[in-house]
Amino acid sequence: MKSPILISLLLLAVITVSAQPYKRPSTLNPNSGYSNVNELAGGFGLGITSEDYARHFVGFTTTHGYQLNLFGLNVKSNLFGGLGTGILVYNGGILFPLYGDFRFTWNRTKPTPFIFGRSGLLINPDDFDHGTRQFINLGGGIRLRLNERFTASFSPGIMVQMGNLVPRDAFIDFKLGLAFKP
């Protein structure tokens, strides 16, 4: 007599447990993580452009970092921070940027506005002591989401560079980029 009651209770417990809804585990920021931004860059000098490294530049930069997605108060935005390098060909020679890059993007619609700030060194391999410069580059742009992993961007900005025994130069710069987020 005990056996059918015990089996019935066990069967009832198993059925009750299996009838519970399955809840998938979730994280606060499911899309946060590593991101890579590659950009073609160019700029035109402002002010006195007769000096070397003051008239124009073109080049390529790549930035690797972390994208943190922020969801709150019905605002979808993300913050990106990373380190980057590249090569910039100026009218006076080649400089290699080494910089930190920060970006804030408002929402994830098509297209999306963002602001950026980057700062670092422009390393001159021909004259490291006197030709290396510091720079700061601020601006904004538009980001277009291509699919879940890729976004394209266009961003104008202003860049100021200065160094030891070199004049301060300013540029209007433009970047055309492609970002990858696995």
Image (spheres, rainbow, N blue to C red):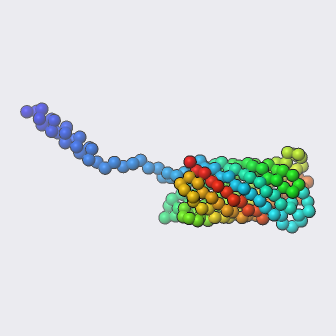
Q: Quadrant of residue 51?
A: bottom right
Question: Is residue 170 toward the left or the right of residue 83 in the image?
Answer: right
In percent of width and height, residue 60 lies at: 74, 52
In percent of width and height, residue 68 lies at: 57, 53
In percent of width and height, residue 40 lies at: 72, 56
Residue in the image at 23% along x and 45% along y: 16
Q: Quadrant of the N terminus?
A: top left
The residue at the far bottom in this view is 47
In terms of depth relative to the viewer, which is nearer, 91 or 95?
91
Residue 169 visible in the current orientation: no
Q: Quadrant of residue 91?
A: bottom right
Against 94, is 45 above or below?
A: below
Residue in the image at 85% along x and 45% along y: 125
The residue at the far left in this view is 1
Question: Is residue 16 toward the left or the right of residue 168 in the image?
Answer: left
How many numbered marks does the figure carry? 0
Q: Quadrant of residue 175?
A: bottom right
Against 49, is 69 above or below?
A: above
Residue in the image at 76% along x and 62% along y: 173
Residue 17 visible in the current orientation: yes
In percent of width and height, residue 4 lies at: 11, 35
Question: Is residue 129 toward the left or the right of residue 181 in the image?
Answer: right
